[in-house]
Amino acid sequence: MDKLEKILERITTLVKDGIDLQIQKGTKKKTFELSLKYESWYTQASAVISQIIPERLGDFRAAYKLEKRGEINPETYTISDYLIGLSISKAGIQTFNTDDVYQSKLVTQISILTSAQTSAKSVLHDIRTVLRAELFDDDISAAKELLKTGYLRSAGVICGVVLEAHMKSIAKRRGITYRKNNTPISYLNNLLKANNVYDVPTWRLIQRLGDIRNLCGHSKDKDPKLDEVQDLISGTDKIIKEIF
């Protein structure tokens, strides 16, 4: 997990560094200085792409250098050609603008690197989802054991914590903002329904689960019933497995 987080941070930096390697219209970077910066960037970016999306490594390298080619034209001209100052002329007239070709090839490489960033985020999200699901499953199992031994309130409170945490993760994943403090299940339920995360029947189910959780955690005048806590456990298990 930590390694993937660091990779994501590194890719973000590399994308920014790649953008800095572009040439501004009307200016001319010193080829030697540009070559040093680009070669370092290319080495690091290639290593990232080989790890995240190795299937695109060939395209990334082809923008830098082609091992075999016939004539040199805008399609076969590469960044390595540009860095050594190669230009193609006929009758003393340059046949194509090498600055434009360099720019185009670099944009291709930056796009591939951005794709690696997207893929890394997806991998990280999948890992987080699996880990969270495993933790929640453990908590649900613990609640079931507490129920068997007669600790109804404790079992209900655990399910309430799981349900609230899952609903917060849904909001975060979908970019839905919510207040950080005082976030009862009813508040999160209304928020997610308002943002069309799920339909009215699901909203009603979660409202009931929240009521049972409150009964387990707050009310001293009335004890939760066995079947109510059983419903809370099964309902929470259903929500964390079906709503994302």
Image: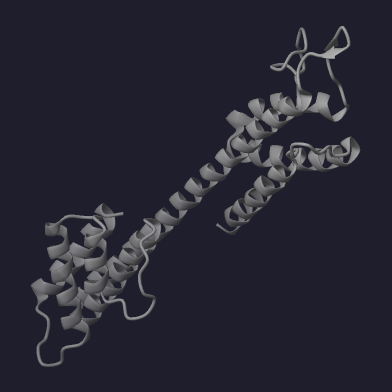
Residues 205 and 196: in front is 196
Whole-percent x, y for residue 98 in the image = 78, 24
Q: Residue at x 16, y 62 (%)?
A: 203
Is residue 81 toward the left or the right of residue 44 in the image? right
Q: Quadrant of residue 2?
A: bottom right
Residues 221 and 206: in front is 206
Whole-percent x, y for residue 239 in the image = 23, 59
Q: Quadrant of residue 160?
A: bottom left
Q: Residue at x 21, y 55 (%)?
A: 198
Q: Quadrant of residue 171?
A: bottom left
Residues 235 and 8: in front is 8
Q: Is residue 180 visible?
A: yes
Does 208 appear above or below 57?
below
Q: Is residue 134 visible?
A: no
Does 133 appear above or below 182?
above
Is residue 233 toward the left or the right of residue 106 in the image? left
Q: Residue at x 81, y 39 (%)?
A: 27
